[in-house]
Amino acid sequence: MDDIVAIENWFEGTGYPVIIAGPCSAESEEQVVDTARALASDGRCHIFRAGVWKPRSRPSSFSGMGSEALGWLARVKEETGMIVAIEAGTPGHVEEAIESGVADIFWIGSRTVSNPFSVDEIAEALRGTGRAVMVKNPLTPDIDLWSGAIERVYGAGISRLAAVHRGFSPFGRSRYRNMAKWEVPLGIRDRFPHISIISDPSHLAGEASLVPEVAERALKIGMDGFMVEVHHDPDRALSDRRQQLTPVAFSSLMDRLMAGWSGVSGRSPYDMLQGLRDQVDSIDYQLIELISARMEIAARMGEYKRRHNISIVQIERWLDIARSRVAHGRSAGLDIPFTEAFMKLLHHESVKIQASVDSDHNPERDHPQ
C-alpha cells in the first residue's frame, strides 16, 4: 500500500494539517450556507463536511435531509469553492451523490465500518469513481476490523485514502463521549505508514468545551488533520448539538492548534519513545476511569449491605477475589506480589467506601476491616 496518497495532496491548495469542518447534519439551506460562509471567511477550512444521510441509534432521531441536502451542498461548492465531504452508508448514497456532482470525498462511518459486508458493497460502488475516501474507526477498539475496512477500500482501487479516529464507544462512564484509546490509531500508523490519520475531536469529546483539549492531544501525537463539527447556531442543531462549535469557537480552536503545531508532518520519522508514552498515557486514563467505575459499584454495594444489615467484609468473597485475580494476573504475565498488592489496595479502598456509606446511616456500628 505504498501508493496511498497523503491527504494534503488530494486536491490542489490543501494545506497541512488538513482541516475538515462543517455541521454534523445538513438541516436546512440557510444553516448549511451560513456555516460554510463563516468557515470560508476564516480561511483555514480546506474541506466542508455535512451529514446528508445520518445513521442514528433510534428511528425517532433526526436522520438527515437526504437527497434534498445535495442541492444545498452544490451551492456551497459554487459560492465558496470548498471541497465537499459527505458520509455514505449504502451504495445508493454513493451513486446519488456522484450523480449530483457534489461529493468530492466520502467517509464511511463507524457503524458501517463495523459491518464488513457493508464496507465491501460501498467499496465496490466507489470503484472507478475517482473519489477520495476516509474510513472512520469502528465502534469497538478492534484494530483488525478497522484495518480490514481500510484494506477493502484500497482493494477497490482507491489510493486517495485516509483513516479517521473518532474514538470508541465506552462501556461505562467516561470523561469524554467516546474513549480515545490513542494506541489504536498509532497501531494503524504502524500497519499503514503511508496513510493519513485524521482526528475527529468533536465525536471523541462529545462536548464543545472539551474539543480543544482533545484536538491538542491529537496534534501532539502527530495526527495529519482534524474533522471538526461546526454549526452556525449549535443550540438549534437537530443532532449532536452539544459537541458542535460555533464559527467563532472554531476560529479560536484554529488559533490554538496552529500556535502549537511544530510544522513537522506526522509522517516524518516518529519519536518512538513519545509514541510509547502516548500509549501509556492512554492506558493510564482508561485504568483510572475503570477504577472509578469499580468504586461507584462499591458504594452501591455498601448501600445494599446497609439496608439488609450485611457485614461489609465477606472473608470468603475476598479470598476468592485474591486467588482468582492473582491467577489471572499470572496468566497475563504480571508479577504475583504486584498483583496481590494492587488487589489489596483496591479492596481496602472498596471497604473504606462501603464503610463510609454505612456510617452515614449507622455511625455507632462497628465495621470489620
Image (spheres, rainbow, N blue to C red):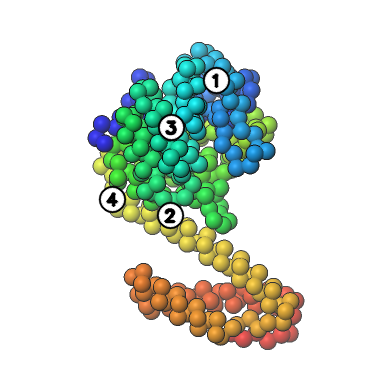
- Image position, residue 340 (x, y; %): 43, 78
For the residue pair 278 and 323, the one nearer the viewer reads as 323
For the residue pair 238 and 110, the one nearer the viewer reads as 110
Secondary structure of residue under mark 3: helix
> In the image, what residue type sits under mark 4?
Met
Question: Which residue is disc 3 drawn over?
Answer: 122
Secondary structure of residue under mark 2: helix
The quadrant holding residue 157 is top left
Residue at x 56% of width, y 57% of height: 172
Question: Which residue is disc 2 drawn over?
Answer: 282
Question: Which residue is disc 4 drawn over?
Answer: 272
Sequence-earlier tag: 1 or 4? 1
Q: Is residue 126 above or below residue 299?
A: above
Sequence-earlier tag: 4 or 3? 3
Sequence-earlier tag: 1 or 3? 1
Sequence-earlier tag: 3 or 2? 3
The quadrant holding residue 240 is top right
Sequence-earlier tag: 2 or 4? 4
Question: Which residue is disc 1 drawn over?
Answer: 70
